[in-house]
Amino acid sequence: MRIIQIAAKFGVAGLFLGGLALVAGDMAGAAGQSRPAKLVVPELSDLAKTGNAAFDQTCAKCHGTHGVGTDKGPPLLHPVYNPGHHGDAAFYRAVKSGSRQHHWRFGNMPPQPHITEKQIGAIIRYVREIQEANGIVFRRHRM
């Protein structure tokens, strides 16, 4: 009976440590993929050009030029921000209401009330065109 209790404790500890290793590996992988090997900046649509200007004025200080990330905010050119995981509505809500820290350790994103509805739409279009040019496309989210 004592052997079964000891084995059960080791099994629980093993599951816990295995889970920690998976989480750590996932975060390390995310950090390792934070910047594309070679940034591709495509020919932008007119709406995306407008979004680029707005992004540079309002978003780049945290998310970096072309969304490559900085020490203040995450890269938007990362697979986790593909439209199947973070749809356009998620970007819209983040700008309007802020966003709690959940994938990265930069802290919560505060709301950006100075950005207009029109600018938000243009910024989202810009981010999506840059993402697509860098291989970040819709991937269905699985939990």
Image: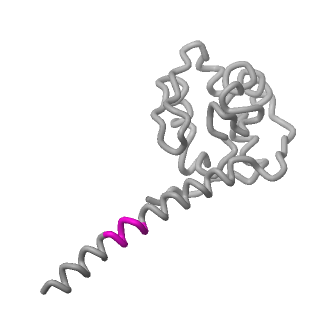
**Quarter where residue 42 is shown:** top right
**Quarter where residue 125 is shown:** top right
Can residue 93 be spotted in the picture?
Answer: no
Quadrant of image for the C terminus: bottom left
**Quarter where residue 68 is shown:** top right
Task: Name the residue rendered at 66%, 40% in the picture.
Answer: 76
Can residue 68 be spotted in the picture?
Answer: yes
Q: Residue furthest top?
A: 114
Task: Name the residue rendered at 52%, 28% in the picture.
Answer: 109
SS assignment for the magenta stretch, majority: helix
Q: Is residue 133 left or right of residue 107?
A: right
Residue 55 image position (x, y, % from top left): 71, 25
Indicate yes or no whether the magenta region holds residue 49: no
Residue 102 image position (x, y, % from top left): 47, 42
Q: Is residue 142 left or right of residue 65?
A: left
> What kind of colouring is applied to the model shown?
one colour
Per the rendered image, the range of residues in magenta is 13-18
Q: 19 or 63, which is in the foreground?
A: 19
Q: Residue furthest right?
A: 43
Q: Is residue 1 left or right of residue 100?
A: left
Establish if 52 lies above or below 75. above
